[in-house]
Amino acid sequence: MSGEPAGSRAAAGPGRDVEATLVDAVRDSRASAAMLYVLEAGADSLWLAVLTGVPRQIAAPWTRVALTDPLPVADAVREGRLVWVGGTEELARRYPRPSLVLPYDFVLAAAPVADDGALRGGLVLLWPGSHPARLASDERALVEAACRRLGRALRAAAEAGEPVPRERPRVVAPEPDRELGPPEALAAFVERLPGGSCALDLNGRIVFITREAAALVGADPADLLGAVPWEALPWTDVPEVEDHYRAALVSKLPTSFTALRPPETRLTFELYPDASGISVRITPCGPGPKAPDPGAAPPSGPSRATVLYHLMHLAATLTEAAGVADVVEQSADQLLPALGAQAMALLAAEDGRWRVLGHRGYGDAPMEHFDDVPLTPDTPAARAMLTGEAEFFGDLAELRRAHPRAVHRYGMESWAVLPLIASGRRIGSLVLAYDRHKRFPATERAVLTSLAGLIGQALERARLYDTKHDVARRLQAALLPHSLPRVPGLDVTARYLPAGQGLDVGGDFYDLIRLDDTTAAAAIGDVQGHNTDAAALMGQVRTAVHAHATAGAPPGDVLRRTNRLLIDLDSDLFTSCLYAHVDMARRELCMATAGHTRPLLRHADGRTEVLAVPPGLLLGIDPEADYPALGFPLPPGCVLLLYTDGLVEDPGVDPDDALDSLGDLLRSADPADLDVLADTLVQRVPNPVDDIALLLMRFGTTGG
């Protein structure tokens, strides 16, 4: 079963061949559903192109997936491997965001789709919850074979000028795996069974219903055909009903529930799903308590289960958003496909003027019209923010009547303008635009208002986050050298990279001090912690080292005097530091260390050695600590690397092994361009767990 079976049918063209290949993949692997994502060359996002076995609205939250998103398909494409999730518990542990939205029983595989070494997208296959928790070897082979066939099909479509569109994913009907008899015979067979029966397609619409089933739910069969139950029958518009439908649809496992048809008829619904839809058995289960009068049927619009679905997914997504840009991206990714809108803009009020925080679907020119303009009440966005009340315009005429002087269509036909409120304060407006005439019933207005509330809270947190990071960056820039001095015969570059979490400020520092025409001093250190306290102490340590160095103190004395200063400051933070005195005339290097990482020296021939500086205690521990110094020769063309431990700190890796790896990288790299070399060294730690500071010095062939 490890071969690559041919497609089940001829395709009408390259684009259709992609769809046929996806259906074949589902059939051959015995999966229940599949989603094919495409990756454009040089892009950093996957776009859902084709799906089968699940309706578009289920997959709407994942229409666009960034390669950095915590999702199986993103991991599979980014890492170039098959990702297997063997059940609900594993999904919740490894990928909490999708598990919160899809808490149903299923297993999945995600794998990269490539052709001739070029990544073209990703494939997601779903199996029913009855599938074993492990992927069999023959199933893995089938998945990998399907990915290869899809890669070839995507390449053929692109070469034929028919690339798979990303704007709106295509839903492909699964291939039937059974022969059906004459419709009249099947209908008669079902009518003879006790109770009522109906069938739902993958979108939840009723495609068949018996007379008895219609009588049990209290409606005419003609009114039910083609309708979604929770829209045609108001008493089923409760979250539990649609949730059971979603559970059956995703898990492909039978499920059942009871519902009360007013005033006192209690019915049992049994759902039996497969790849083409859901069969439903309806039977009475005896009288129940009388239901309250439901009143008039609610107007059309998103059901309450759909509301909860998108609210829950957006809330889960926004908890991971850090800055304002993240909130804009996450909101657009969720809202536009879920609500069927074509454009979105987030506007904030600052000092009586509008600021466009971000947008999707609009060009840059329209947004430039709104950015930095006065906050006047005669525009929809301003009125919504100033009054705290949403405005809805089903067509251009409504917009013109309400705001005759502020009409800007930009190809749109209807709009929802919602206030963004955080902690009771009105902070801006959310504009959603549609390219068609649209009504906004009360239920949909409630949905949009709730979504805007979530975005407003997230936006306030994100703006605070951005402000803190801006302050942190400014503080760090003020504490580190603005530039490095020029020393004859010495080329120098430095880097500072904050850790991947927390504020962009910490206790790492570096410095280069020109003492005279032939001597200089270099220092690098790390104050314990990753916060403003560590940064403040770092500034004091760097100032002390600088002062003692310019006073002419030798390396050991510089560290001894700085240590006593830290003792006098009575700080509870300890500091590592390495100090080097460079004599270009004598081509000598004299160093002392206070518990700092060992420096590396790369010789002109590429040989790299760890310089064994005599150890000394961290600064701030013992007022009587001594810091012995040791001299080293500086052969022409050598490169000295001073760095903090973030460059070699890797959880689960032995420190000596990490130092050896750094030495190998320094040896193999080209030292001709120090800036390129510094970037290469820093990039070896893409997500540092601690701050990184490094100082690179290359010594020329002549001194002085």
Image (tube, rainbow, N blue to C red):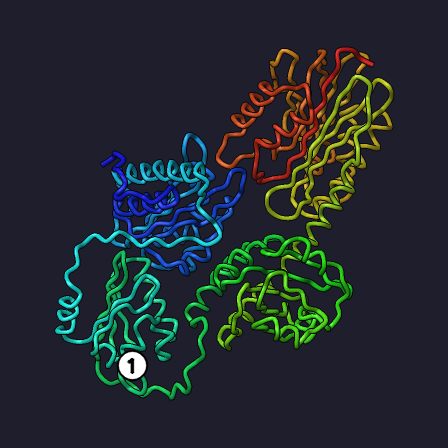
Q: Give the percent coordinates (x, y) of residue 64.
A: 49, 51
Assign the C terminus to one quadrant of the image: top right
Q: Give the percent coordinates (x, y) of residue 298.
A: 43, 80
| 3 and 477: which is toward the camera | 3
Q: Quadrant of residue 394?
A: bottom right
Residue 84 visible in the displayed image: no
Which residue was labeled with disc 1? 219
Q: Residue at x 70, y 54 (%)?
A: 467
Q: Residues within 10 Å of mark 1 (few under 14, many from 20)?
A: some
Q: Give the percent coordinates (x, y) of residue 506.
A: 68, 43
| 400 and 353: which is toward the camera | 400
Q: With respect to residue 588, does 77 lie above or below?
A: below
Count of numbered badges drawn on the protein: 1
Instruction: Answer with left or right where residue 307 lies relative to residue 554.
Output: left
Q: Quadrant of residue 405?
A: bottom right
Q: Residue at x 42, y 72 (%)?
A: 303
**Which amino acid does the dot numbered 1 rest on?**
Ala
Instruction: Answer with left or right where residue 13 lies relative to residue 552.
Output: left
